[in-house]
Image (tube, grey):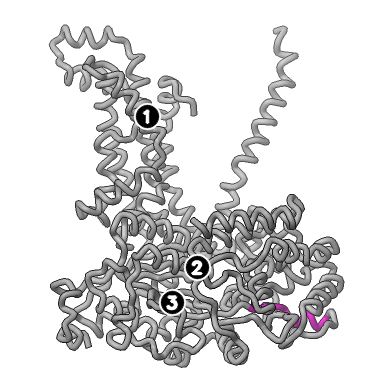
Amino acid sequence: MRTSAATRPRRVLWHVLALALLGLVMYPLVWVAGAAVTPTHEIVGNTRLVPAQPVLDNFARALEGMAGIPVWRFLANSLLLAVLTVTGIVASSALAAYAFARLRFRGRNTMFVLMIGTLLMPFHAVIIPQYIIFQQLGLVDTYVPLVLGKFLATEAFFVFLMVQFMRQLPRELDQAARIDGCGYWGIFWHVIAPLSRPAFGTAAIFAFIWSWNDLFAPLIYLNTPEKFPIPLALRMYADQTSTSDFGAMIAMSVIALVPVVLFFLAFQRLLVQGMATSGLKG
Amino acid sequence: MVLGLAATGCGGGEGGGAPEIRYSWWGNADRAEMMREAIALFEEENPDITVTPTFSEYDTYWEKLSTQVAGGGMPDVLQMDNAYLREYSDRGVLLDLGGQEGGSLDTGGLLEGLSTAGVVDDARYGVPIGGNTFSLVYAPELFEEADVPMPEDGWSWKEYDEALTAVSEHTGSDPYGAADYTGLIWVLEAQLRQEGGALFTDDGRLGFSRDRLAEFWESAADLREDGAVVPADEAEQVKPLAPLGANLAASEFTWDNMLTRYVEESDLDLELAPLPTDSENSGQYLKPSMLLSASAQTSHPDASAELIDFMINDPRVAEIFGGNRGIPATEAQREAVDYTEVDQTIVDYEDERMSDLQEAPPAPPAGAGALETEFIRLAEEVHHGQMGPDEAAGEFVDFAERTLSS
């Protein structure tokens, strides 16, 4: 009763500010959507959101693909890489995290610290030794260098995220499961894994987006154009030494955004839960 | 031809089995499509050689190549930039194609000004694909309207400054008379060459003093103050376009093959003109726009040379590419192209200038690419008024000494 009169204007102000901020954040995205249907020579330096005369040429040129490779091929490659990455990361990180969170073994803390330490190592510091190894194994120009590590829980960020989540699951549940006859595997499979779904969902979304947007690793390891994922193809439209086709590039960006958005929508409920419960700040 | 070479005892060099050549280049999507056609033609003619293509955009191309060089997965044949040629040849990763010259590689058809391009310390580490020359691109109609003398052979820097100021006044700075030309290291190079100097000395050190650089940056200070050239912040806003392409300027110095791109971007009719000079000397030369090199580790040096030879000499390859790789470096390819109107303008311009073009400087020292980047950064500081010409010149010379001596 007493509060409503005082808070009403404050709430309105709050919403107006939030909407203004949203507009600011959304502007680049809306601009991209507008630019995708703007004739290519009008794009650069243009701040308008809606073109005077929308055209679909950009999409036509983007869909043509390049060097005889249709655009769906790049999309399919990206999708395959993303699916393998997500599967690998969720499966292997979950097992590693379970070990760190629940099992007691010699050197556990040291190993945990070492694992966190790998987070501090920039990718560029390991790229050349890594390249030499894969080159010697004859695995360059295959997807193995891009996904092998994902199946071996080398992405410390995801292991850490899941450890944090699993640590706050009540231990009484493990004990109850043990009394019912579960071993380590049974506890993981029947108790920890089902309860950790929000953390798995969060990891899946991040892994998907990172893999989908990754340019550098595919650039280094892939040679055959037929194996390129979409970010490599995207870069080809803006070569500084020749004529750039910004229209086709932006149209292709929009096409490339669709799967990420769909994936996000499908998993966002889990993402929010995961963020709220794992102590991860977004 | 391949059989003949195998018989002359290159068997040791050629690995057993059918040669498979990995060929890597940078460029846009159009170029990838053209390459596919050219490679198909090559494979048709050399059924025993297989070419595996790979490509990326310019920046990422160099990131990838440096990893491959360090990790041992270099392509057999690769596109090379003159600015990086010495860096890679000094590291010993490029093949000296001298052994293939006269055999599977014919360099006899190269234009006179380009015949020594790609040669470093007497070894042929690269073969030019195309050449270009540093020039002025301008909009004749705006110069005419402002009633200033048109650019011509032997005009002076003062005349150019006056012309661009008059154009700016006449158009009310829409567009400006010119882009700020002191942002380009190539303009400095042209001026140095006109004075009889060079950007780098023969032993790979800086060819100019701190004072000379400060003077260069200072030289356009009045133009900046009078608002005769495009202000730094406006040039910043239109990136990645250049001021000329964004209709901000009526003239700009650049490599002549860039005309193709500017014509597409700008609303104005554009022409090429010789550089202004205060001496007898234009300072212009034919620079290799890109080269082809082979890897020192390749197990198929002859097949690699064969591919390079095909790419630079075969007239049908030139027909496929048109102006995409710049104006071809060999006579045979130059004549074969059915040029577009713009490309024809460039060819005519180069033919006309040919007698005035000087011998090209030797391949720049390792680190030249980094120097150009630093030059652009410091020039922008000066243009924005964040740094004085003296201070910036001092910083550049220090940076150059560190970079070139390491």
Same chain for mark 2 and mark 3? The answer is yes
Name the residue tied to disc 1: A117
Q: The disc labelled 2 sits on which kind of residue?
A: Ala
Q: State if disc 1 and disc 3 touch (CB < 8 Å).
A: no
Q: Going 28% across and 27% down the picture, which residue do you hit?
A: A94
Please report, as a chain letter, where disc 3 is located: B
Secondary element at tag 1:
helix
Disc 2 marks which residue?
A: B83
Give the spatial CA distance, label 2 vs label 3: 11 Å
Q: Is residue A108 shown above or below A129?
A: above
Answer yes or no: is residue A163 visible: yes
Q: Secondary structure at mark 2?
A: helix
Magenta stretch holds residue B139 = yes
Q: Residue at x 44, y 69 (%)?
A: B85
Left or right of B114 on screen, residue A150: left
Q: Which residues are magenta?
A: B135-145
